Image (spheres, rainbow, N blue to C red):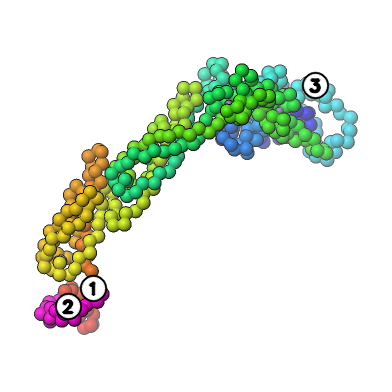
Amino acid sequence: MSARDWIDKDFYRELGVSSDASDAEVKKAYRKLARELHPDANPGNADAEARFKSVSEAYGVVGDPEKRKQYDEARSMFGGGLRGGFGGGSGFDFGDAFGQQGGFTGGSGGGLGDLFGNLFNRAKSGGGTTARPRRGADVETDVRLDFVEAVRGATVPLRLSSPSTCDTCHGSGARPGSSPKTCVTCGGVGLVSRSQGAFAFSEPCRDCRGTGRIIDDPCPDCAGEGVNTKTRTLTVRIPAGVEDEQRIRLAGQGEPGRSGAPAGDLYVRVHVTPHPVFGRSGNDLTLKVPVSYTELALGTTLTVPTLDGVVSLNVAPGTASGRVLRVRGKGVQRRDGQSGHLLVTLQVTVPADLDDDARTALEAYAKATATHDPRPELTALVQKARQS
Ligand SMILES: [Zn+2]
Ligand SMILES: [Zn+2]
């Protein structure tokens, strides 16, 4: 990193602290950001990765009291005048001013990962382990069930594809027996400085694609990525009575944890295909049964389907339209003993066409019942309205 970079960049802003923040505040801000932005927590997120590097870079300077002092001095010296005439040969020798301390990797040669790893191991356990235990990621998937499967429960095979650490190289990306080398171009930092006119930028190192490591002999199973996609087949028991859009959590069936940490959970979102005839209301099944007026008026015995057969229902003479009959125990039967019923709603249908005989018979019926008012309450209201 060049001296110019130091001054050009606002490391304090990068860390979200003021320039008079205490060392402890700087450290705290860095830890929080590093945790949020760490590539492990943001797989495939290039923005987070870039931010992670910027924050690490900033902390490499501001987090080191000696470098911070130099940085502050340089900034106060050149402050706002930087943008314009930097390259004009002011005669100031940055090499002298900053000596060989320009980079934050110093002599450790370990790159960002090590810097971060050491910091965190110290913070968490004081130990020297390289791979921190990390709980496996939660996995979410969808499954479609038909209506009957949802009511009764079902055992469904699931194929899950997820990225996981390559078994062959244990994540290093290098062919077994070889190991990745520190990138010479960026010294393992993953960042290089580039000057453009008066400005200087840090950008991800192209030689190592920002990883800080070069793999000469890539692992054949993951092509050097250290990660490959594994497909697992899992048999999942969906409990009886699951509802459409319900999310079922299967503890410990997500991605495996790292270094002995527990696995994540698997969430299965269930989509239920509706039934052409039956409906659901919680644990109850519902069924609408069209009936004729005479069936309700005279009474009858109806045969209706259930999910697993048929039942006979007695309809008493004079049963109202819309009446709900309950067939006990023919709904959802849950494992925990809860059970629902089949709720049968009787609905009168009116024939669209009547033949002559039927019409004659109905007209005779209408005449015979002319004195019967089917809606006396409404009739009373209508009369009252007319009188006022
Ligand atoms: Zn591999
Ligand atoms: Zn590099």
Q: Are marks 1 and 2 in contact (CB under 8 Å)?
A: yes
Q: CA distance from mark 3 to mark 2?
A: 110 Å
Residue identified by numbered label 3: 99
Crowd tier of the residue under label 2, counting other residues whose Cα lies within 10 Å: few below 14, some 14–19, many 20 or above? few
Residue identified by numbered label 2: 358
Of label 3 and label 2, which has the lower sequence position?
Answer: 3
**Quadrant for ligand 2?**
top right
* Rendering quarter of residue 220: top right
* Mark 1 residue type: Pro
> Which residue shows up at 39% across the image and 42% down it?
247
Using residue 280 as the reference point, say whether residue 329 is left or right of it: left
Q: In the figure, 157 relative to 120: above or below?
A: below
Q: CA distance from mark 3 to mark 1?
A: 100 Å
> Residue 153: where, in percent of width, then height?
30, 42
Of label 1 and label 2, which has the lower sequence position?
Answer: 1
Q: Is residue 368 magenta?
A: yes
Using residue 157 as the reference point, say whether residue 8 is left or right of it: right
Query: What range is drawn magenta here?
Result: 352-373
SS class, disc 1:
loop
Q: CA distance from mark 1 to mark 2?
A: 10 Å
Crowd tier of the residue under label 1, counting other residues whose Cα lies within 10 Å: few below 14, some 14–19, many 20 or above? few
User: Looking at the image, which is closer to me, 107 or 209?
Assistant: 209
> Which residue shows up at 11% across the image and 65% down it?
299
Q: In the figure, 374 relative to 82: above or below?
A: below
User: Looking at the image, which is closer to me, 110 or 123?
Assistant: 110
